[in-house]
Image (cartoon, rainbow, N blue to C red):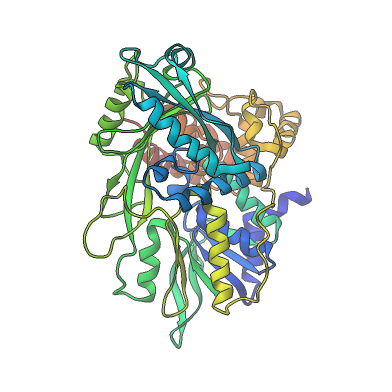
Amino acid sequence: MGAKNIYSRKSLVNSAKSVEKWDVIVIGGGATGLGVALDSVTRGYKTLLLEQVDFAKGTSSRSTKLVHGGVRYLAQGNIDLVKEALYERGLLSKNAPHLVKNQSFIIPNYRWYEGMFYTVGLKVYDFLAGKLSLGKSLHINKKETMNRLETIRRDKLKGGVVYKDGQFDDSRLAVNVAQTCVEQGASVLNYFKVNNLVIDENQIKGVSAKDMETGEDHQFFGDAVINATGVFTDEILRMENPDARNMVKPSQGVHLVFDKSFLPGDDAIMIPKTEDGRVLFAVPWHDKVIVGTTDTQLDEHSLEPVALEEEIEFILKTFNNYLEKQVTRDDVRSIYAGLRPLAAPKGGSEKSKEISRSHKVLVSKTGLITITGGKWTTFRRMAQDTVDKAIALGKLPKKECKTVDLKIHGAKENPDLSNHLYIYGSDQPEIQNLIKEDQSLGEKLHPRLDFLKAEVVWAARHELARTIDDVLARRVRMLFMDSKAAIECAPEVAKILAKELEKDDVWVEKQIADFKEIASHYTI
């Protein structure tokens, strides 16, 4: 039972309260914050991470599920960004092989010159990947394109170009990184909201935060305080300076999820030029297909962004341009929106697809360090740069980065993809053990999907899950795959959680109501 305690929220909170001073305090538990905490704790710094809701609750669970070098940045001539991302893609598939897989993409060609054009471009992509390449790109003829993409529109089809990139499960990676942090000795706390900064003589000394479960207020002191809050960056910066200029401009990306029948093979489709000049992907993911994304500039942000009607229509229309069998609104199983924290342009407006996607580490007058921009693929490198900055500022003693070869919790080579539990990697046998102890945990949560009751118990005991949303959106991905199914099994999940977390019926009722409210954004 020893392993159980390290993930218990109570013991994590108690140990956090007992520390007089931290080396590093990280605000934000998405990809970036978790990456920073992992980099920091593995270098040997005493590390605390505070997340206002759940790990990867925001943007980090709402990606296109690609670990990619960014074919689009190649077209923009941003070679350095592509090289960095391809290098990180290689490391991630080595350090979390249970979650990252090699995915082939086909660009269908409908004009005679496209085949040559994309083949040449992707040869450059292969070359930049060097020895971390996932496989060579090649041109295929019309017949092979139709064989591999059964549902593709045949009229005027000339052929296709195949290339390789990575595909992964974003919030599962976040959870595994959080577990790795805990194992390495960090305190990572979800449902802990930072509501103020502790500033003394114009120097940042720590943070004030509220435990959102108990309502208790706490103060934590630390040498380096790092703001890794994505689209919430400006709220933290305004705690330090109420007149701070906005650093972040949210850009919304929407994805629609369909049944696998609309893209039955193993290949993904990359549509290189949509009407608004972006790329659109259709990617097989957990026995479904994800289609996205859009790029809509917004003026405000929220924890549960809502897809706009025109975004839904844009994706349906663009996807249908490439399909023999047309998709309709009724075919949408789930819909999700994420907000990219793009660097706000100084002065004039820029098109969001042109705003820099590379990350930036900024230091305020008080010494608060802010990391913005970037993407999941480069989260490890962003963290390294951030901690290096804290060292350069003299806030931390110099120690070398350890994450290049660090295996993430659950890492397991060559997982058996035929069993959906493969995403647990080396933890998979433990879930089978739960079922051996209690047969009922082997039952499915919903007849349409493979997820089991045992996974809810595991999420509560070992994966820091506290709510139905934590479980159905980010531990098992049901809300993202079939929102109606998720709503239907919410009461069952609440019951299992209440038993695990020792909660009463009032809690159960509130949880079900809260989850239904959240899930309403995922249905058309």
Question: Is 168 placed left or right of 340 in the picture?
Answer: right
Q: Residue furthest bottom?
A: 201
Residue at screen point 43% across, 40% down: 71
x and y percentages locating residue 313 in the rendered image: 25, 30
Q: Would you identify the image quadrant in which residue 236 lies?
A: bottom left
Q: Residue furthest right?
A: 2
- Compared to residue 430, the image places residue 265 above or below, namely above
x and y percentages locating residue 439 in the rendered image: 71, 26
x and y percentages locating residue 458 in the rendered image: 65, 40
Residue at screen point 66% across, 72% down: 18
Residue 218 visible in the current orientation: no
Q: Residue furthest left?
A: 348
Residue at screen point 59% across, 61% down: 37
Q: Would you identify the image quadrant in which residue 381 lies?
A: bottom right
Placement of the C terminus among the 4 image quadrants: top left
Q: Nearer the viewer, residue 218 or 117?
A: 117
Question: Is 301 placed left or right of 102 in the picture?
Answer: left
Residue 423 visible in the current orientation: yes
Residue at screen point 69% across, 61% down: 185
Q: Nearer the viewer, residue 300 or 219?
A: 300
Q: Nearer the viewer, residue 437 or 278?
A: 278
All told, the count of numbered labels is 0
x and y percentages locating residue 288 in the rendered image: 48, 25
